[in-house]
Image (tube, helix red, strand yellow):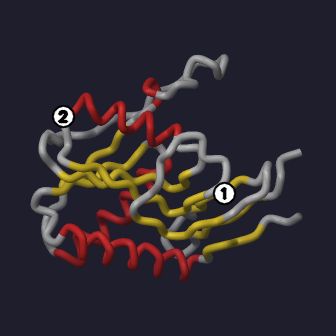
């Protein structure tokens, strides 16, 4: 089985545009809403979503980045020293609607960790999840995205990778063949 592109650059940009329009339909002017990207790869997606929303709405949007490293249930089992990434949430989430963004939803463990980490910043009135790619199989926790770019079914051993490219004209989503 070969690697295959499931979203090329053009389709990826259309998908991001559609996701932004869905958010605008649900949240209007974002006056009581904040977007939080999950480190590391969810931030690459959330940066682009927030940039597009700011252009479309011409208004500021509360935006933060959340590191889940030490909230994961498996962080001690890796056997190597983990490096935390920066959490950058310079506002209270108390009473706000939160859109949590990650690139690929697979087992649900990263999102569970993100929900735990969010509690350190207050109690949101609601939390919704956006995932660029929803891998339906192998979910270990009952977590489902509210906003989905693409749903894929993969075989055991396949990896879904979002390649953001060096510039914004070389991005794609790839299913990588089974690792040896």
Relative to 5, residue 139 above or below:
above
| Neighbour tally class for label 2: few under 14, some 14-19, many 20 plus, Cα within 10 Å | some
Relative to 24, residue 100 above or below:
above
Q: Position of residue 28 (x, y in %)?
A: 16, 72
Mark 1 or mark 2: name the one nearer the start of the chain.
2
Q: Nearer the viewer, residue 84 or 28?
A: 28
> Which quadrant of the figure has residue 160?
bottom right
Q: Name the residue rendered at 55%, 60% in the picture.
A: 134
Q: Position of residue 137 (x, y in %)?
A: 66, 54
Label 2: which residue? 122
* Element class at badge 2: loop
Relative to 134, residue 126 above or below:
above
Q: Quadrant of the C terminus?
A: top right
Q: CA distance from mark 1 to mark 2?
A: 33 Å
| Neighbour tally class for label 1: few under 14, some 14-19, many 20 plus, Cα within 10 Å | many
Q: Quadrant of the N terminus?
A: bottom right
Q: Position of residue 127 (x, y in %)?
A: 29, 49
Q: Name the residue rendered at 57%, 64% in the picture.
A: 165
Q: Nearer the viewer, residue 55 or 123?
A: 123
Label 1: which residue? 160
Q: Name the residue rendered at 37%, 49% in the picture.
A: 37
Mark 1 vs mark 2: give the one in front.
Answer: 2
> Which quadrant of the figure has residue 166?
bottom right
Looking at the image, the residue that sits furthest to the front is: 142
Q: Position of residue 62 (x, y in %)?
A: 19, 54
Q: Name the residue rendered at 13%, 40% in the picture.
A: 94
Q: Nearer the viewer, residue 35 or 106?
A: 106
* Element class at badge 1: strand
> Which quadrant of the figure has residue 93?
top left
């Amino acid at each position: 089985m070969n690697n295959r592109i499931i979203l090329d650059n053009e389709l990826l940009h259309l998908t991001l545009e559609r996701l932004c329009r869905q958010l605008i339909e649900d949240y209007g002017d974002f006056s009581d809403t904040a977007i939080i990207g999950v480190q590391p790869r969810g931030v690459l997606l959330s940066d682009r979503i927030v940039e597009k929303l700011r252009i479309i709405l011409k208004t500021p949007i509360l935006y933060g980045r959340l590191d889940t490293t030490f909230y994961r249930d498996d962080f001690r089992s890796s056997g190597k020293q983990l490096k935390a990434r920066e959490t950058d949430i310079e506002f209270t989430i108390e009473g706000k609607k939160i859109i949590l963004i990650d690139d690929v939803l697979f087992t649900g463990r990263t999102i569970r960790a993100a929900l735990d980490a969010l509690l350190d910043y207050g109690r949101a009135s609601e939390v919704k999840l956006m995932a660029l790619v929803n891998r339906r199989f192998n979910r270990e926790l009952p977590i489902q995205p509210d906003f989905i770019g693409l749903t894929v079914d993969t075989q055991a051993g396949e990896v879904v990778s979002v390649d953001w490219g060096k510039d914004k004209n070389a991005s794609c989503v790839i299913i990588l063949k089974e690792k040896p």
